[in-house]
Image (cartoon, rainbow, N blue to C red):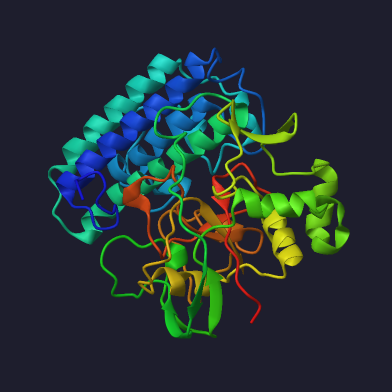
Amino acid sequence: MNSITTSFRYARTQQLADALTNARHYTLALFDCFAQAGYDVNANVPYLPIVNPPLWELGHTAWFAEWFVLREALSSHPADAQRPSLLTKGDDWFDSNTVPHRSRWNLDLPTPGGVKTYCHEVLDRVLDKLSREPNTDEALYPYRLALAHEDMHGEAFLYTLQTLGLQAPHPAGGEPVLVAPGEIGFPGGTIQLGCGPDANGFVFDNEKFAHPVHVAPFRMDGALVTNAQYLDFVADGGYDNRQFWSDAGAAWLMRQERSAPRYWQRQGGDWVTLRFGQPATLAPHEPVRHVSLYEAQAWCAWANRRLPTEAEWEYAALSGHPALRWGQLWEWTASPFEPYPGFAPDRYREYSQPWFGTHQVLRGASFATPARFGSAKFRNFFKPERDDLFCGFRSCAWK
């Protein structure tokens, strides 16, 4: 691995410097996609609950790095920063904990040029400070946190581009690597779910701490459910048959008035899907993407299958089985997002705790996730209705 693909969890000073620079350049490139598409990058991007105004999101990523690295904040609490922001109103503009989502469209933000200057200044100071840090996990924690945060927001920028039908830079629109289908049997056993207290490197608070979980023998797809498999469900009237949908899924479906996944469209007798605003032929053997948890559950009910639990997913991902591949799309699991035993929030106090009980766990990574971010231990989490994500699913046999 080169220095910008080394896992951010274990990256040392020079590797972190390279990765932080790479992440910032990529964030700026994604931001420029909105201007290239003719958008006023703040006010004229339509309000949607699932996106942020691009100018605010750009400023927020730099502000977050400034908060935890340069301002040496002890936590995300507003009183815990040890130094003031480089921007007089930085906290008033970019603190996601105190700036409600809806209000981000109405802020008197600096110009795009001013926010970019702020981004460059923060990065320069972060890199200078990093160059003097010891190569210890404790000293590098805020840098790794800032890098992970920016990588997550970079993928969120891509969700926004897809949602608005805008062109994305290469390789964001690239196709996932295809994997031959097939079912794999796993013998089960007791695993340590999560990360142990003696784990080296960076660990998210919701991954703490490792605890024993018994996994019964199970059989799971080696590959994600494909467009062809999902199309059989659509053609069989799956969206019209209430028996396949949970109560929550049926209520969601009624609000959507949908008869196929979000970006599928009929053109003559064929199906196409929209990828960053461009129609593409629906490739039958490609994993189905942009489906909600409810749609994944409905397909499983129709196929007499089920979603894997996150313990089963982690067991399989760490089994070393050569036929199992992950990282094409985020994968819905059957597990609600809940704390592990003994959970306590880390410095970024709002990262996990507010979302327990209302979100669902996804595992893996997507084609848009930086390689340095991928981990079989990482717990992604979103509301069940989200279908703007680069997500799909695989299924398990009931017995």
Identify the residue shown where x is 72% and y is 65%.
Answer: 303
Quadrant location of residue 159?
Answer: top right
Please tell me whether residue 322 is drawn above or below residue 214 in the rendered image: above
Quadrant location of residue 69?
Answer: top left
Q: Is residue 73 visible?
A: no
Q: Is residue 229 left or right of residue 302?
A: left
Q: Is residue 265 left or right of residue 91?
A: right
Q: Position of residue 122 (x, y in %)?
A: 29, 31
Q: Is residue 149 left or right of residue 392?
A: left
Q: How many marks?
A: 0
Q: Is residue 170 left or right of residue 312?
A: left
Q: Position of residue 73 (x, y in %)?
A: 35, 48
Q: Position of residue 103 (x, y in %)?
A: 63, 30
Q: Is residue 343 visible?
A: yes
Q: Position of residue 182 (x, y in %)?
A: 52, 66
Identify the residue shown where x is 56% and y is 15%.
Answer: 39
Most extreme residue toward the top is: 38
Q: Nearer the viewer, residue 317 or 247?
A: 317
Please tell me whether residue 359 is drawn above or below residue 158 in the rendered image: below
Q: Quadrant of the C terminus?
A: bottom right
Identify the residue shown where x is 51% and y is 53%.
Answer: 330
Q: Nearer the viewer, residue 398 or 115?
A: 398
